[in-house]
Amino acid sequence: MFELFAVGLEMQKRMIDAQMQGVEAARDMVQAAQENAKAGMAANQAGEAGMKAMKSWMKLWGMRG
């Protein structure tokens, strides 16, 4: 009887460990997605700044853009 109880507890422990590994993997994926989003936003801002600079340069030389 106690052996069955011990086996049941061990199985529960293994299931909890497996679920925790899944939670950690999901957390890592969310963190990576957030970092990618930050990098994408920074690249977008740099692109916008480049366009503004280009338009200013074109205005300086009398071009239309």
Image: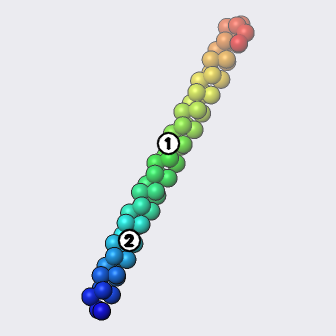
For label 2, the crowd category at 10 Å Cα-Cα, with few meaning under 14, some 14 to 19 and many 20 or more, is few
Q: Secondary structure at mark 2?
A: helix
For label 1, the crowd category at 10 Å Cα-Cα, with few meaning under 14, some 14 to 19 and many 20 or more, is few
Image mark for residue 26: none
Q: In 3D space, how far apart are the residues under numbered discs 2 and 1 (Cα atoms)?
A: 32 Å
Question: What residue is at 59 percent from the left and 24 percent from the top?
Answer: 50
Question: What residue is at 41 percent from the left and 67 percent from the top?
Answer: 20
Q: Nearer the viewer, residue 5 or 24?
A: 5
Question: What residue is at 43 percent from the left and 54 percent from the top?
Answer: 28
Q: Can you say which quadrant of the picture contains the C terminus?
A: top right
Q: Can you say which quadrant of the picture contains the N terminus?
A: bottom left
Number of the front mark, 2 or 1: 2
Quadrant position of residue 61: top right
> Percent x, y for residue 46?
56, 30
Residue labelled with disc 1:
36
Q: Nearer the viewer, residue 48 or 31?
A: 31
Residue labelled with disc 2:
15
Quadrant position of residue 49: top right
> Percent x, y for residue 23?
44, 62
Kindly indicate whether the residue at mark 1 contacts the one at mark 2 (C-beta within 8 angstroms). no
Q: Amino acid at mark 2?
A: Met
In the visual, does 16 lie left or right of 4? Answer: right
The correct choice, above or below, for 7 with respect to 36 in the image is: below
The correct choice, above or below, for 19 with respect to 39 in the image is: below
The correct choice, above or below, for 9 with respect to 46 in the image is: below
The correct choice, above or below, for 11 with respect to 30 in the image is: below
Question: What residue is at 46 percent from the left and 51 percent from the top?
Answer: 29
Q: Secondary structure at mark 1?
A: helix
> Percent x, y for residue 27?
46, 58
Sequence-earlier tag: 2 or 1 = 2
Q: Amino acid at mark 1?
A: Asn
